[in-house]
Amino acid sequence: MLRKLATPALAMMALAGCNPARSDLRQKADQVTATIFNTNSDGSRAGQRVEPRFCMLDSAIIARPVGDPTVDATLWAVADEQAPVAPELRQALEANGLRLGIITGELPSDVLDAFHSKPSQVESQWVHIALPDGEHTPIVMAEPVEKVTLFLNHGGKVDGRDYLDAAGRLLVTPKQSGQHDVEVRVVPEIQHGTRRRTIGAVENAGSFAPQEFAIKDGQQQEILRELAATIALKPGQTLVIGCRPAQARTLGTFLFLQPEAKSDRMLQAVLLVKAGRNNDGTSPLKIIEEVTNDPTNPASPSVAGPASMVSKVVKPLKNPNP
């Protein structure tokens, strides 16, 4: 008789909320809720919205006459050009007139002076942008030219090509890595040819949203993925990208050598890139472009000034995927 009563008794206990297993599950659920929303189990503390991951990019272009020590020697004397990329990629970059390195710590004083230039020199400025983790943005390096002939080196084979209405830029993609680092992927791109109107699919419309299409105006895009470099930047490090001016008609000189406005001089440029990241659960400090010429604090209030060869495109780019 006692055995027959045991099952109904347990059922009544479960209905009354006395199920030990159910109680444990409820307690664990409350703990998870408190962890995610930063609340107590009784909801007495206001919740905190969990923000997505963001990366912050600070970029600046320093331009000086070709061969000026500031862009041709000073930076590279303190930059580590060996560690950032594999030897095979470094050789491919060198063959195409490109060079890159990492500077740890403060920039050289000659470089810092470029942010407070004399009236006869080109003043450099920092451009700031916050990007969702893994999104990429273009940094314009070469303004459009009517025609240019480039000798591109593909695995030791040189290919000469003529480009009409050509412009050059670098596609930069930051992505959080580890606890504090940011991986920065840099891919060269050449835009060329007549601008055409096309109809393309809109990305990131959502898994269950109907497919949308948009009209796009643009040129042909040649993305040189074989020259893509991914560099892990730690806090306090600066990525330096430049060219080898002696290697004429290469991709490097096309991107980093430009004629000075209202002058017959050629300017040699270097690109500086710093990267940061938000902490989990916090929003980025800046999501818009800001320009400053304070070399010691890229996030300082903006100071407007004359600028040339400064990146003009800093908004996230959805297409193409580098």
Image (tube, rainbow, N blue to C red):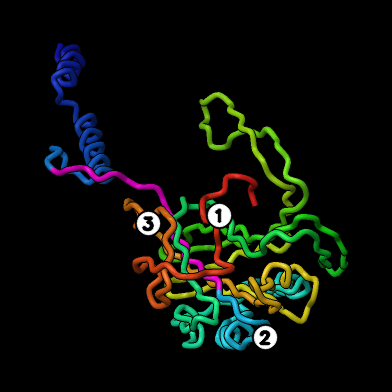
Count neighbours of disc 1 (C-alpha within 10 A) and say few if under 14, some if 14 to 19, many if 20 or more.
many
What residue sits 13% from the left and 19% below the top? 16
Count neighbours of disc 3 (C-alpha within 10 A) and say few if under 14, some if 14 to 19, many if 20 or more.
some
**Cα distance in 3D space between marks 1 and 3:** 15 Å
What residue sits 76% from the left and 46% below the top? 194
What residue sits 77% from the left and 59% below the top? 146
The foreground one among 204 and 151 is: 151
Position in image of residue 258 (x %, y %): 68, 71
Residue pointed to by mark 2: 67
Residue pointed to by mark 1: 137
* Left or right side of 254 for 302: left
Whether the residues at callouts 1 and 3 have beta carbons within 8 Å, the answer is no
* Quadrant location of the N terminus in the rendered image: top left
* Left or right side of 162 for 46: left
Mark in the foreground, 2 or 3 = 2
The amino acid type of the residue labelled 3 equals Lys
Residue pointed to by mark 3: 286
* Left or right side of 4 for 204: right
Whether the residues at callouts 2 and 3 have beta carbons within 8 Å, the answer is no
Q: Earlier in the sequence, mark 1 or mark 3?
A: 1
Q: Earlier in the sequence, mark 2 or mark 1?
A: 2
The amino acid type of the residue labelled 2 equals Gly
Q: Which mark is residue 189?
A: none
The foreground one among 309 and 17 is: 309
Instruction: Identify the element where label 1 is drawn.
Output: strand
Q: Is residue 222 visible?
A: yes
Magenta residue span: 45-61
Instruction: Identify the element where label 2 is drawn.
Output: loop
